[in-house]
Amino acid sequence: MIASVAVSLDGRIDDGGPQRLVLSSPEDLDRVDDVRAGVDAILVGAGTVRADDPRLQVRSAARRAARAARGEPETPLRVVLEGRTPIDPAARVLDGGGTVVLRRPGGVAQVLAALAARGVRRLLVEGGTGVHTAFLAADAVDELHLAVAPLLVGDGPRFVHPAAFPARRMRLADVTALGDTAVLRYLR
């Protein structure tokens, strides 16, 4: 399972304003698109859907065509974890099918089991804070992609909430400069 997040230098994923703060450079957004093209499913929480209204699709036509040539859907399965508040039925993530909404999942193990039953072997978790916290605290993340943007935000949601995380270090696999963004790739 891969977790991917873009953060500011002070660990924020957004500034809390009405417009989504794009922290990734264009080059990093292309890297994320490439990662999306290589997974079976992309997962976010309902808060991310409400805040950002993402499509969660592979953007590159060449990557979509390559997936289709392999007999895969052009875009991976899109998964939304929904809590007590339902997502808007007009949310873009619901456009065109290929989306599963898991309502009030009992925990990370149940989410992973439900997705495995659907044939998901390689999952990309894109957030937000509560979802990243749950997957990292459950020690379910094999690979973490941390894109660090060169700005300080000051206020807004953090990458993770305080939690009982596994007491071990991840291994830094590589660091890549993509435009003005530094991408750190950690392995469990």
Image: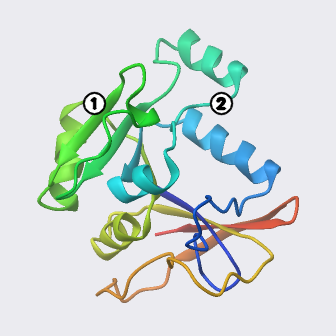
Residue 183: percent from left, percent from top? 72, 65
Determine the residue positioned at 34% across, 41% down: 79
Residue that label 2 marks: 59
What amino acid type is highlighted by mark number 1? Answer: Gly
Residue that label 1 marks: 119
Q: Is residue 14 left or right of residue 1?
A: right
Tell me if residue 94 comes above or below residue 125 in the rendering.
above
Kind of element beneath mark 1: loop
Tell me if residue 150 comes above or below residue 55 in the rendering.
below
N-terminal of the pair, mark 1 or mark 2, is 2
Residue 142, numbered circle: none
Closest to the observer: 77 or 80?
80
Q: Is residue 72 left or right of residue 17?
A: left
Q: How many marks?
A: 2
Q: Is residue 20 left or right of residue 1?
A: right
Check whether the beta carbons of the residues at disc 1 and disc 2 lie within 8 A of each other. Answer: no
Kind of element beneath mark 2: loop
